[in-house]
Image (spheres, grey):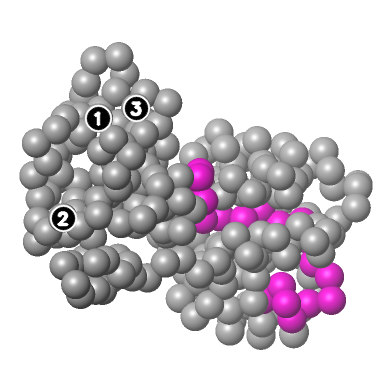
Amino acid sequence: MKALIIEDEEFAAKRLGKLVMELAPEIIIEAQLNSVESGAKWFAKNKQPDLIFLDIQLNDGYGFDILDGLEDHPPIIFTTAYNEFAIRGFKYNGLDYLLKPIVKEDLKRALEKFRKNITKEQNGSTESLSQLKQLFQKEYKHRFMVKVGNMFKSFNVEDIAYFKSNEGLICLHTHKAQVYPIEYTIDQLEDILNPVHFFRINRKFMVSVKAVTEIHSYFNSRLLLKLLPKEEEQVIVSRERTTNFKKWLDM
């Protein structure tokens, strides 16, 4: 069997290739490509492989852009640096994925699933692929308008350190220690903010990756965070979110 790796991080591509050789020596890596352009050129000149390892975000576009140029495609194991909240749609679409940095056991399970399904229908459904595209090409909120006295002021999301809920009132806290109320709920913010940059750590806080300065172990398998600007209240990652929070920071 032959496989193709499309991954724009050279180290990640080489490591993936090495792991595939170790776990599935019957699979030959035909090529390692690093862009939408090189992928399109390769498929124009070569027969399709039996399996594709496809990075979702490449330097010159999305891995989906390569698939759009094909009439059909073999089974795909997607790779992504997105956290598990952002890729929750994968499970419902029945697609395999590897969360970077790739864990050997995760790859082993994905390859076992590939072997079991190799005799079944090879192409993912158009509907599932369309849903997956929407998930990763979704437009997230870029700025917030807040009322300051009788005026309105605009803040880019890059200016925001974290959001805090206090008795139902949600305030955005900027990196310059400015605080303004906004008319959103934490649940709404979780849906409209890019999960690469913001993470909901508990019922009250949604923090940006740039605001986290220190992480300390806390009792009951939780984490205690130090934020910048400083937050007087203890900022604690809930136990059920601790594992995903660690993966989010390590993307």
What secondary structure do most residues of the magenta stretch adopt? loop
* Disc 2 element: strand
Mark whose residue sits in front, 2 or 1: 2
Residue on which disc 2 sits: 179
Front one among 189 and 83: 189
Marks 2/3: CA distance?
A: 24 Å
| Disc 2: CA contacts within 10 A as few (<14), some (14-19) or many (>=20) | some
**Disc with the residue nearer the chain's start (2 vs 3):** 2
Q: Which residues are magenta?
A: 66-86
- The reply to whether callout 2 and callout 1 are in contact (CB within 8 Å) is no
Q: Is residue 190 left or right of residue 30?
A: left
Front one among 93 and 69: 93
Residue on which disc 1 sits: 236
On whether residue 85 falls in the magenta region, the answer is: yes
* Disc 3 element: loop
On screen, residue 174 above or below 249: below
**Residue 238 has which mark?**
3
| Disc 3: CA contacts within 10 A as few (<14), some (14-19) or many (>=20) | some
Marks 2/1: CA distance?
A: 20 Å
Q: Given the image, on which type of amino acid does mark 3 rest?
A: Ser
Q: Given the image, on which type of amino acid does mark 2 rest?
A: Val
The count of marks equals: 3
**Disc with the residue nearer the chain's start (2 vs 1):** 2
Q: Position of residue 54 (x, y in %)?
A: 61, 62
Q: Is residue 121 left or right of residue 9?
A: right
Q: Given the image, on which type of amino acid does mark 1 rest?
A: Ile
| Disc 1: CA contacts within 10 A as few (<14), some (14-19) or many (>=20) | many
